Image: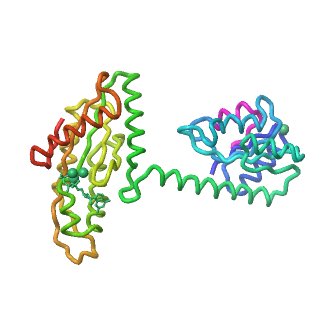
Amino acid sequence: MKILVAEDDATSLFMLQSLLEKWGYDAVALSDGVEALSVLNGEDPPLLAILDWMLPGLNGPEICRRLRMGGGARKGRPYQYIIMLTVKGEKENVVAGLDAGADDYVTKPFDSQELQMRIKVGERILLLQEQLRKAALYDSLTGLPNRRAVIDGLEGEIARSERSGESFAVALLDLDHFKEVNDSYGHATGDSVLAEAARRIRSAVRSYDLVGRYGGEEFLLVFPGLKGDDALRICERVCSVIEKKPFFPAPQQGSATPFTVTASLGICEWSPSSSGPDEMLMGADQALYRAKRKGRNAVCL
Ligand code: GH3
Ligand code: MG
Ligand code: MG
Ligand code: MG
Ligand code: MG
């Protein structure tokens, strides 16, 4: 794990860097506050930082305040765990440091074993935070982004097309007569069909297309850069990978007789005039309805 350490005293910085490396961390050592903030705000930033109070450019508490604007982590940014490490040991300093947004406060001279354990506390919090983030964004049955996450992705794609004028398309996929799968083979089989259908959909689209679980047996697909006709071709491939290979009942069902599942898809192409997520989803839903009316196992645009 990468740890940023910002300290303007060269000897202390060198000592901290050596300790971190001895403990197996990848240390990013800096002596300037502005640089530290820019690394923390950069691409693939360190998730844990040890900040001195007094630093040239920006001091430790000010870095904390800027990282915590709006409460915890800012939108689209990971939460970063901050340990203030400073000679300022007065109660008012501790209070001010934590109030600025530090997660922990250690005074110098510090005990290295204690610092190592406090870093481990930080790692625990970050791991928990990562587990919560995943649980909030991914569907546990299929492993796909959940409804909220895939709609977020759709909104991002709309914003991109509004800037670039480049088109893209969305598709709603609904498994056909899925209630019958549950009724005939049980709910466990229904669940395993959903998970397998998710894998097949993923395998039929391009790596940078977005696929999310939109609802029960419904999936939302987002195709960056594609016109409706090109999305149609990919959706036909999706239809075919679902239909062409058999599905099997869950083991507890006690039967190994394969069965077929099909899907219907409705596509909506983005255009500057019908641009919002709700309009696009409604357009895709209407196309899906037509695909169902056509007899299912079909794609409509
Ligand atoms: P249609 O072709 O018109 O879409 O028919 P359908 O049976 O698929 O449609 P309907 O909306 O009537 O039924 C959807 C079914 O999907 C009902 C619901 O029990 C089932 N379902 C939704 N979520 C899950 C799930 O997580 N697991 C399982 N096993 N079944 C689910
Ligand atoms: Mg200093
Ligand atoms: Mg449905
Ligand atoms: Mg259905
Ligand atoms: Mg239905």
Does the magenta run of residues contain 39? Answer: yes
Asked if residue 99 lies in the magenta stretch, the reply is: no
Residue at coordinates 23% horizontally, 78% vertically from top-left? Answer: 254
Q: Nearer the viewer, residue 180 or 19?
A: 180
Q: Which residues are magenta?
A: 27-40
Vertical side of 111 occupied by 70: above or below: above
Ligand 2 quadrant in view: top right
* Residue nearest the viewer, comparing 176 with 45: 176
Quarter of the image containing the C terminus?
Answer: top left
Residue at left offset 14%, top offset 46%: 292
Q: Is residue 123 above or below residue 42?
A: below
For the point 73% across and 43% down, the residue is: 5
* Residue nearest the viewer, comparing 277 with 237: 277
Q: Quadrant of residue 171?
A: top left
The image shows residue 46 at horizontal and vertical percentages of 63, 44
Side of 13 relative to 76 (left or right): right
How far across and how far down the image is residue 257, in percent? 16, 71
Residue 246 lies, in percent from the top left, at 18, 62
Horizontal arrangement in the rendering, residue 222 relative to residue 24 (left or right): left
Image position of 196 with respect to 58: above or below: below
